[in-house]
Amino acid sequence: MKDNKQSIDANSSAENVEQHLQELEKKDYELLYYSQEQSFNADELARLINEKRLNELLAQSDEFLRGLKSEIKDFDEGDINSDE
């Protein structure tokens, strides 16, 4: 009888954990959904964005694009010369 009670307790504990995880998942989904609907004003964005890091990333992307443009130009020029 004691084993049966422990089994029932274990099942109810597992069910409680499963229910709790499902509720958390639902809350996460709701937060994601509503965060996409939320608009930010300029002051909020300025507070949230790390401007220094953003500028570093933009500089890196500009450098990458310049290098890519150079590679594409070199590739295109190589194609033209190989036909001659």
Image (spheres, rainbow, N blue to C red):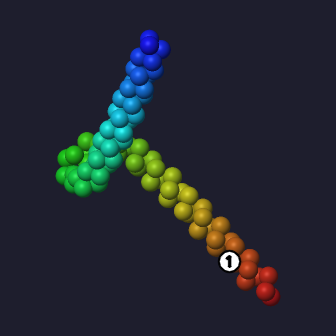
Q: Position of residue 43 (x, y in %)?
A: 19, 47
Q: Which residue is mark 1?
A: 76
Above or below, comparing residue 41 to residue 76 in the picture: above
Q: Position of residue 12 (x, y in %)?
A: 38, 26
The quarter of the picture where residue 18 lies is: top left
Above or below, comparing residue 6 to residue 22 in the picture: above
Above or below, comparing residue 26 to residue 9 in the picture: below
Q: Nearer the viewer, residue 35 or 41?
A: 35
At horizontal 34% and vertical 33% (from top left) the residue drawn is: 20
Number of marks in picture = 1
Circle 1: residue type:
Asp
At horizontal 50% and vertical 59% (from top left) the residue drawn is: 62
Q: Position of residue 33 (x, y in %)?
A: 29, 52
Above or below, comparing residue 16 to residue 77 in the picture: above
Q: Position of residue 2 (x, y in %)?
A: 44, 11
Left or right, residue 78 beside residue 23: right
Q: Nearer the viewer, residue 44 or 24?
A: 24
